[in-house]
Image (cartoon, rainbow, N blue to C red):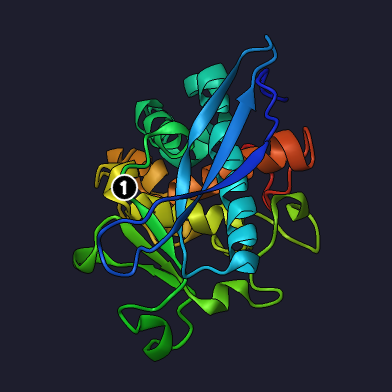
Amino acid sequence: MRSSTLLTLLTGVAAVSASPLPGRQEVTTTTTTIFSSSGTSSTTPAFPIHSSCNSTLSRQLTRAFDETVTLASVARDHLLLHGQSSPFVKKYFGANSTTIAPLGVFSRVASAARGKMLFRCDDPDRNCATQEGWAGHWRGSNATQETVICDLSFAPGKRRWLDQVCGLGYTVKGGATNLFWATDLLHRTFHVPQVSEDAVHHYADGWEEVLGMAEKGDERSGFDSDALIYFAIDVYAYEVAEEGRGCGGYEMGN
């Protein structure tokens, strides 16, 4: 099943003038245009990229943000089309859950105003340098709208692109939620109040806990970071990567 909405991504890169705040000499923004099957189009707000990301890193992040918007848009359109009847909704959010929460979250990732949010490649809090294995982090109280992408995120083999979903033995059940650029950045946008309005949190940790919450009818499932990510990538796998089959790593209905 494909959503009736056709997503065509056109990326533009533009430089905007400096902010008076130190360390924000230049910001690069990415713009994604979405064309519907009716021929109308809408341009999503840009994800601002700090000048500390050189041209090579900026190009990768530009593509990564485009794919994040694609992932969120496919999830949003699936919810609009199928609502509570979707087996993916029942699996990740519960048999009697409402789609209002995840629909709102994915809509905001795809098209909410970006405000003062910023993604940067330097290490102002020294977490990339001092925390082993960190590939990025939300700056929290130091700068609530900012996210750091550490060098490790750009290392060969660390992240995959959406055209690799269902390839190389990947399954939704067995794969890491941050394996793809799109799922990793989806998680990172959940931390930014400008997008999530501080409504998305970590209630479950991993596949089993996500399904356990849904089976119990826990109303927090629609606001759980892992549940939202598993839902989005599972729907994408089924509707786009391997249409009508997916690569969930589980039997449909279980």
Depth check, front residue: 217 or 123 = 123
Q: Is residue 202 visible?
A: no
- The spot of residue 74 in percent (x, y) is 60, 33
Q: Is residue 58 visible?
A: yes
Left or right, 81 with reference to 196:
right
Q: Quadrant of residue 87?
A: top right
Depth check, front residue: 161 or 201 = 161
Residue 147 versus residue 117 in the image, above or below: below
Residue sitting farthest toward the left: 141
Q: Quadrant of residue 95?
A: top left
- The spot of residue 44 in percent (x, y) is 50, 32
| Residue appearing at x 54%, y 60% in the figure | 177
| Residue appearing at x 62%, y 65% in the figure | 55
- The spot of residue 233 in percent (x, y) is 60, 46
- The spot of residue 28 in percent (x, y) is 50, 53
| Residue appearing at x 37%, y 35% in the figure | 113
- Residue type indicated by callout 1: Val
| Residue appearing at x 73%, y 52% in the figure | 165
Crowd band around label 1 with a 10 angstrom C-alpha radius: few (<14), some (14–19), many (20+): many
Task: Find numbered disc 1 in the image and state the secondary structure of the residue it sits on.
Answer: loop
Left or right, 218 with reference to 242:
left
Q: Which residue is mark 1?
A: 200
